[in-house]
Amino acid sequence: MLIPLILLSCIPRAAACDGWIRLSATEVQGQTWRDAAPTKFLSATLDMDGDGELDVAAIVVSRDSKRSAIRICFGGSERRQQCQIIAVSENIADVMGLEKKGPGCYSYAEDDVGRPSRGRQICGRNDMLEYFKFGSAGSFFVYETNRNTLGRYWGSD
């Protein structure tokens, strides 16, 4: 699914973003698989949009803890920084992780609207964001520069 950045954008401290709280390491204590990353797989720093400035993605939960999502804040000075909320679902934050995927070509099973890959790969020149459940196939997000959108692709393994 292609997500227009402008429709979901918000300034980090604006009211539109205030309903989301970043998940902390203490909230996932005891999940030993998280020990494999210094960020506990709760955040990732990458350059998704290829502008040379670091972007930060983090797992967030709604204030009422009923929903979880990913907040991506695209780099730039804090005043220019644009954040967006994606992958909103029922609260599954405690079993989900984030990881940077480097530029390259990756296999996928289908896109977010259900179109099968039919053996194609998605390729990108910038970093991509993997959103996964440990031990299960996940999805990844690709910033599609020509459309100013994020595409979501479901893994094939």
Image (spheres, helix red, strand yellow):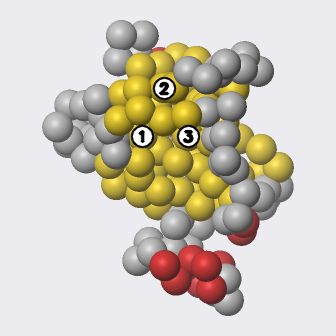
Where is 92 relative to 103, above or below?
Answer: below
Q: Are marks 1 and 3 in contact (CB under 8 Å)?
A: yes
SS under mark 1:
strand
> Which one is earlier in the sequence, the residue at label 1 or at label 3?
1
Total numbered circles? 3
Q: Which residue is mark 2?
A: 122
Q: Which residue is mark 3?
A: 140
Q: Residue at x 41, y 26 (%)?
A: 123
Image position of 98 (left or right of 76)? right
Q: Is residue 5 visible?
A: no
Q: Residue at x 41, y 48 (%)?
A: 101
Q: Nearer the viewer, residue 87 or 81?
A: 87
Residue type for callout 1? Met
Q: Which residue is mark 1?
A: 128
Q: Is residue 34 visible?
A: yes
Residue type for callout 3? Phe
SS under mark 3:
strand
Screen quadrant of the N terminus: top right
> Which one is earlier in the sequence, the residue at label 2 or at label 1?
2
Q: Residue at x 25, y 46 (%)?
A: 54
Instruction: Kindly identify which numbered label has been placed on residue 10.
Output: none
Residue found at the far left of this picture: 52
Residue found at the far bottom of this picture: 30
Q: Position of residue 87 (x, y in %)?
A: 66, 39
> In front: mark 3 or mark 2?
2
Real-space Cα distance between discs 2 and 1? 11 Å
SS under mark 2:
strand
Image position of 3 (left or right of 118)? left
Q: Nearer the viewer, residue 148 or 151?
A: 151
> Which one is earlier in the sequence, the residue at label 3 or at label 2?
2
Residue found at the far front of this picture: 119
Question: Which image quarter: residue 77?
Answer: top left
